[in-house]
Image (cartoon, rainbow, N blue to C red):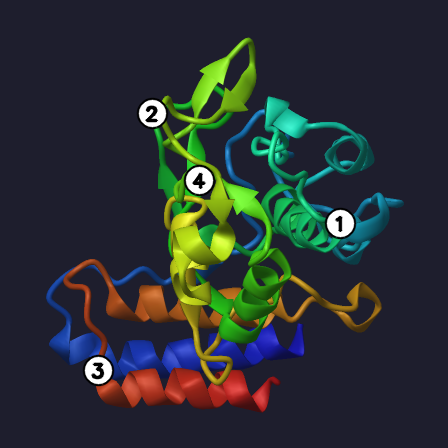
Amino acid sequence: MESKMRYMLLFVFIAILRFEDATGQLSLDPSDLLDVCIDSVNHKTKPGPEGDLYKQCSPWKNRSCCVHETTRNAHLTNLYGFEYDHCGAVKNMSKDCRRHFLQDLCFYECSPNIGPWVVKVSDMKIRKERYFQVPLCLSDCKAWFYACSGDYTCTDNWTRNFIWKDGQNTCPEGAKCRTFLEVFETAENFCRKVWDESWEPVPDEEPCMRLWFDGEKGNPNERVAQYHAYKIAAMGSGGDTIHPTISLLLLLTFLLTS
């Protein structure tokens, strides 16, 4: 609450700075980009507290877009029919690699902090929205990739390239199973490509999302969403750039709330 108040006070100052210079209508309600759940079959319409979430998804229980049943199914079933062992004829996915993909799935199902990156989709049955190029802390990205580098896959884009048969993903015809290291080569390329640019890896020094955090100490991704929401609002509808001074003020506010 305190960090959100700081952003609100800063935004009033930014609005004053931009008033004489504005070329388009400036949104004065960045809260529209906060507390958002994507429009999908398993997501709640609005985030809120849950009494309990299953295992790895538990850090989101205080404010979540998912319910316990979804998180339990994420751990115990192939949610959406997705088969992580699609190269099982060579080698099943390792436990450590699967643990990272499960954490990524918990973020997808549960995070209420993705509003600044939500876009519409029209070609998927399970959702009408997705998030696009969410800034992921590079250290989280590297830990994920290194855990999976010796595991096997047959394609680099898991959202678009699989062939779906009988409700389950299968490798494209003629595709060979190779290690993640061979397919993706770098952690940055992996995080960017595997879910069709859902993630954009950035240096840890920048405002970025964490897949792993202690929910008892709060969700660090709230500040990241606030930073980007107010940055988008500060741009207004007249363009896609922001004055360097305003950008610096936003970054300083982010650092002060760390």
In the image shown, does 144 or 210 lie closer to the viewer? 144
Up the image or down, 82 lies above or below 151; here it is: above
State the residue at coordinates (49%, 86%). 253
Which quadrant would residue 4 be assigned to in this image? bottom right
Residue 243 is marked as 3
Distance of mark 1 from mark 2, alpha carbons? Answer: 34 Å
Rate crowding at label 4 as few (under 14), some (14 to 19) or many (20 or more) other CA atoms within 10 Å.
some
Residues tagged 3 and 2 counted as in contact (Cβ below 8 A): no
Q: Secondary structure at mark 2?
A: loop
Left/right of residue 53 with respect to residue 181 in the rendered view: right
Neighbours of disc 3 within 10 Å: few (<14), some (14-19), many (20+):
few
Q: Amino acid at mark 1?
A: Lys
- Which mark, residue 130? 4
Res 123 → quadrant: top left
- Cβ–Cβ under 8 Å for marks 1 and 3: no
Quarter of the C terminus within the rendering: bottom right
Q: Is residue 33 above or below residue 246?
A: above
The numbered mark, 1 or 2, whose residue comes first in the sequence reads 1
Q: How many marks?
A: 4
Instruction: Report the disc number at residue 122.
Output: 2
Please tell me how crowded label 2 is: few (under 14), some (14-19), or many (20+) other residues with Cα within 10 Å: few
Quadrant of the drawing holding the N terminus: bottom right
Alpha carbon separation for disc pair 3 and 2 = 34 Å
